[in-house]
Amino acid sequence: MASFPIIYNTYKFECTMCGNCCSGPQEVNLDLLDLWKLGKFLGLKSTNILFEKSLVKLVLNENKVWIPQIRFKQKPLRICPFLMNEKSDDGEMKGVCQLHPNHKPLICAISPVGRIVDLDLEQEEFVLVPPASDCAGMESSKFNYIQNTKDHYSEEFINQMRFFRLLTHLKNYTHTEQIFYKLLYVFDLQSPFPEILNLIESKVFAKK
């Protein structure tokens, strides 16, 4: 099912903070919790401001559903707007994510682990996906345990699964970008995320 190696137990990786995964042709897809975390990090009152400020855009993915994606800066280089460059103690430039560690999108936080979900079978696979084609971290000899990732992000994975179900249900109702935007991606940031997710589900699953 996967085009990348399946992670059964361990994988080798250690981030070198090169910033290559935050630049170039990379894409950072977001789920609902990611939107909430971005908005909270920036001190916003509503997620619609993320779109108005052109920090996030909607893209039509291969499954024909509209999903949020971080809009990378285009000039002078194509980079994530949340990437900073800092000098290390030895004077070497390092790529630093402003969102690390508490507001980082899930896809970035678990990298190089990718998650493939089969909603019909209620199954998931974890695969090894190089963060960038020239990622030096993939050459590391450091062992990581996939179970640690599963345990640490268990709640986020549950929320993401609920998001996938929302996408599937809404796809059967409409393919319109504006309806996806209004029903899924614009919400008030003053409430706790579990309450927001419950409210979104009640609206979307009411669509028959």
Image: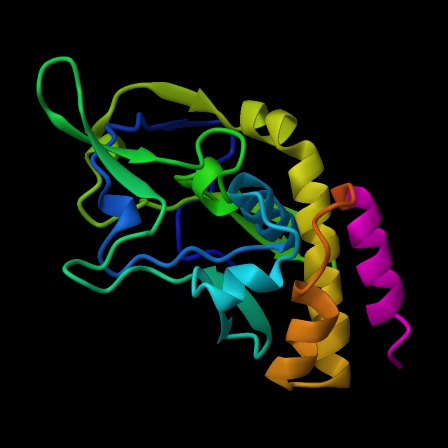
Q: Quadrant of residue 201?
A: bottom right
* Residue 29, percent from left and from top: 48, 58
- Would residue 135 be found to the left or right of residue 199 on screen? left
- Would residue 162 be found to the left or right of residue 109 on screen? right
Asked if residue 198 lies in the magenta stretch, the reply is yes
- Would residue 109 be found to the left or right of residue 130 on screen? right
Magenta-colored segment: predominant secondary structure: helix
- Would residue 79 be found to the left or right of residue 100 on screen? left
Does the rendering let one see residue 72?
A: yes
* Residue 81, percent from left and from top: 34, 51
Residue at the farthest top position = 89
The colour scheme applied to this rendered structure is rainbow
- Image: 113 above or below 185: above
- Image: 185 above or below 87: below
Q: Quadrant of residue 95?
A: top left
Residue drawn at the location 26% of the way across and 54% of the way down = 79
Residue drawn at the location 77% of the way across and 41% of the way down = 192
Residue drawn at the location 71% of the way across and 85% of the way down = 174
* Residue 18, percent from left and from top: 20, 35
Residue drawn at the location 66% of the way across and 50% of the way down = 160
Does the rendering let one see residue 119?
A: no
Q: Is 147 in front, or is 173?
A: 173
Q: Quadrant of the C terminus?
A: bottom right
Asked if residue 178 lies in the magenta stretch, the reply is no
Q: Is 37 in front, or is 2?
A: 37
Look at the image and give the residue range highlighted in magenta: 194-208
* Residue 47, percent from left and from top: 62, 58
- Image: 48 above or below 161: below
